[in-house]
Amino acid sequence: MASLQERNGSYRILFCHHGKLHTFTIGKVEKDEAENKVRQVDYLLMRLKQRLIVLPDGTDIVTFIEHDGNPPDTGPTLPNAPRQAVTIGHLKDRYLSTHANGTIEANSLDTCRLHLNHFVRILGEGFPLGELSLAKMQEYVNHRAKAKISPVTIRKEIATLRAAWNWGGPMELTAGPFPSKGLRYPKADEKPPFMTIEEIERQIAAGGDEKTLWEALYLQASEVAELLAHVKQKAPYPWIYPLFCFAAHTGARRSEILRALVADVDFTGNTVLVHEKKRSRSQRTTRRVPLTPFLKKVLRAWLAVHPGGPILFCHAGTVARSKKRSQTTGHQSAKNRPSSLKGRLATVKKREQPAQAALTRNEVHDHFKRVLAGTKWDQMRGLHCLRHSFISACASKGVDQRLVQEWAGHMNEATSKRYRHLYPSTQQEAIKNVFG
């Protein structure tokens, strides 16, 4: 809110905009007139916050407010003048809507949305990009560090905003280099190497961080076989078991598995074609992974009962807890639904039989957790653990790292380092061969 200050019969108005205090003098006027001006300032600030009006390019907030939202025309805008009319909320909306056409993978786009929402929440949706400075970015980093957010995550958030900023340059939404040079981040801990269940449980018992440790889980070959046998017995839908097997025997990411086509499986050439999105931003790339005899047998059995269509893993019936294929629809969210059962069921109706369609990532993750609930594998974070296990199994058998990287897709040096390990039993045998 704006406030009025009087000194020797002369009035000036004070107001805050994006955390900064601004003032301007209106001079010696009647008190009623000064109070009316205060109300006008509050009204303009409210309209700016609601994004119903914007600051013209090159106009500072004081000039805009002082002239009741109609600043004088000062001629052509200078090339380096701040584009204050563009807010961080505007940049977020434009960036996400542009890349919703498939140029960014759905998972990555959701991550971008999450990161940009943090900036909008902390800086304010109406924060003008022209005021984004290194000092403001350092404030953001310090704020996130104080909230116990890991330095790795903070760096990823900054990288997302940098990508949006750089994209906004040619779109005339941003101007100049992104103000991140010189940022200071908290020191990060190196991610632990991938470990077996027994290793993780020992470290947790010694006081290790459970979340960090379980994210480093990989399964040995015998454990993968045991897990797949459990899934085969407990899976409520026929697509679940072959999907688990595909993940365990190809090392493919979840998104890559969901993009797989029936035509990608070459039983004659004993290969599987994996469609990538992470390796290149300019084109859709693929890689080929050898088809193991086990997976070949499983996929033949699955295709014998496949519901049809080009998608390898799909479903034609209802799927529990699915937004697209549940038995009923019209359920209200927890925030808006009535308290009575009758009121909550008023909008619920039976859904028509859904058509055959590809599985969604939420459906896959939900049934991943369901089929492993209550087992010794219920700490697995997701299908990605089977990717770790695939690469670790290859490494333990001495497979050339170049082949492993080709089968698993692009891995940076830091990730490759975490994969350069052998099973604990293999390590013990190796050291015994050296020292006896």
Image (cartoon, grey):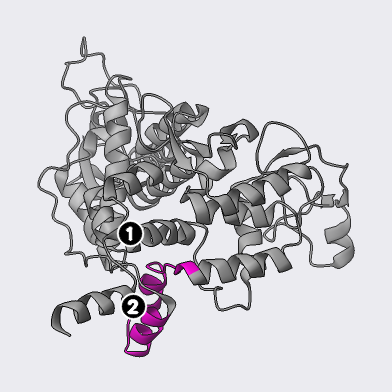
- 134 on left or right of 257: left
Nearer-the-camera pick, 190 or 246: 246
Q: Nearer the viewer, residue 432 or 81?
A: 432
Q: Quadrant of residue 258?
A: top right
Q: Which residue is mark 2?
A: 425
The segment highlighted magenta reads: 198-221
Determine whether, in the image, residue 351 is placed left or right of residue 221.
right
Residue occupying image coordinates x 27% and y 78%: 429
Q: Residue at x 50, y 71 (%)?
A: 222
Instruction: Find residue 305 and report its image quarter.
Output: top right
Q: CA distance from mark 2 to mark 1?
A: 13 Å
Residue 50 shown left or right of residue 295 in the figure: left
* Label 2 element class: helix
Horizontal and vertical percent for residue 79? 17, 16
Coordinates of residue 15 in the picture (x, y in percent) = 29, 46
Q: Amino acid at mark 2?
A: Ser
Q: Residue furthest top?
A: 75
Across and down, in percent, residue 338 comes to 79, 62
Residue 341 visible in the snapshot:
yes
Q: Give the residue pinned by disc 1.
A: 395
Question: Relative to 119, does residue 221 appear above or below in the rendering?
Answer: below
Q: The disc labelled 1 sits on which kind of residue?
A: Ala
